Image: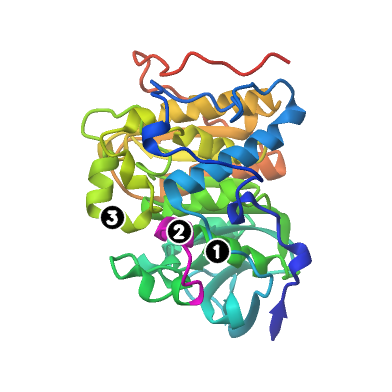
Amino acid sequence: MTFSLSTLSIAASAAEAPPAGTNFPSVEQLPVIKGLPDPFLFNDGTRVKTREDWPRRRTELEAAILHYEYGRMPPALGNTAGVELVAGNYKGVPGAQHKIFKITCGPERKISITLDLTMPKGKGPFPVIICGDMGWGKVADEITTEIIKRGYILADFNRTELAPDNKGYKDSGVYPAYPDAECGAAAAWAWGFQRCIDFLVTLDAVDKDKITVTGHSRGGKGALLAGATDTRVALTAPNCSGCGGAGSFKFQAPKSEDIAAITKNFPFWFGPRFMSFIGHIDQFPIDQHEVKALCAPRAFLETEALGDLWANPEGSRQTYLGAKEVYKFLGVPEKIGIYYRKGGHDHNADDWNVLLDFADQLFFGKKSDRNFDPNPFPDTPKTFEWTAPAQ
């Protein structure tokens, strides 16, 4: 079977073009900002006053985040199509259906992604959780069993089909199709999530209003950016995503990865201007609370590990607090959450169960006993003084 999507159903996004008249200063021209920047401050120096002002400020933020950090994504041509390769039962999960599709997109549909769906039996529609980490293997059967039991589709794909996770990343994936693309690998991975969504919303079994994106570590960076820049995503849920993900650039806890370390090892994850802020992080005009804020008023959950010091769990709480001001301003403080577990850098069953509990509460009104607003760092003050504008 073949499925396709017209351009009319693609969500418009500032990811493809900056706001009209945008003039981005160079690092030398940018002011020093101590602590988290104020997300409510327009480029012209005025401040957001009402909720009706937020979409314009959101557009400015998205353009700046892509310009300075990730690089602008390729356009969405609206020609995503899919062919079913496999259909049957999934042996690893009793009672689950299994379908594999090859989806194609981009110029002359030269870009391809293998999308692996594990589904509850029945017609649905079911909420769907998209995970881009299949390059490390499918989500474990014990976790998939719980996902299916709760009535969700698990959509696995390999984000490295969009951009290989190495210095030769421009040799395949999106880059031969878009030779002028300036985006780093994280933005290419985010673009891949969005093309998977293009296809999934054409399936009758998918509840188009209940789409979740998730990923671990570098995959969490891609998932975060995907949800931040695509309004079709109802819940964005990065796990242990660290520097360039949920962690803060302005607040570096001891032993956490900073911009110098991440660009030394993985310069290809980011856009062309990001490295210019090494040694100038106080002039970086954004921080990751503003990436999270792009998701608002849609839902956001991050899962962190207290022993994962490299991923800056303490700094992640700082950006969570900054983003929560935006959620409060928009009247949806219950739609943002954070969760800490013991242990290290992993995406384990505990993380997945927390995600499912939050999603059940969000989508089905099933009240959870979990605390989605813990503070394991009570002695750490906030790194910002601004608050949301009064309503």
Which quadrant holds the N terminus? bottom right
Region of the chain picked out in magenta, as a range: 177-188
Q: Give the number of the disc on residue 74.
A: 1
| Residue highlighted by disc 3 | 266
Label 3 crowd (10 A; few <14 / some 14-19 / many >=20): some
Residue beneath the point at 52% across and 78% down: 112
| Residue highlighted by disc 2 | 183
Residue 90 part of the magenta-drawn span: no
- Mark 1, secondary structure of its residue: loop
Q: What type is the residue that disc 3 sits on?
A: Phe
Residue beneath the point at 74% across and 27% down: 51
Instruction: Out of 248 and 339, give the one closest to the viewer.
Output: 248
Q: Answer yes or no: do the residues labelled 1 and 2 have beta carbons within 8 Å?
A: yes
**Residue 298 place in picture, x, y as percent:** 66, 41
Nearest to the eye among marks 3 and 1: give it: 1
- Mark 2, secondary structure of its residue: loop
- The answer to whether residue 282 is above or below residue 119 is above
Label 1 crowd (10 A; few <14 / some 14-19 / many >=20): many
Q: Give the number of the disc on residue 364.
A: none
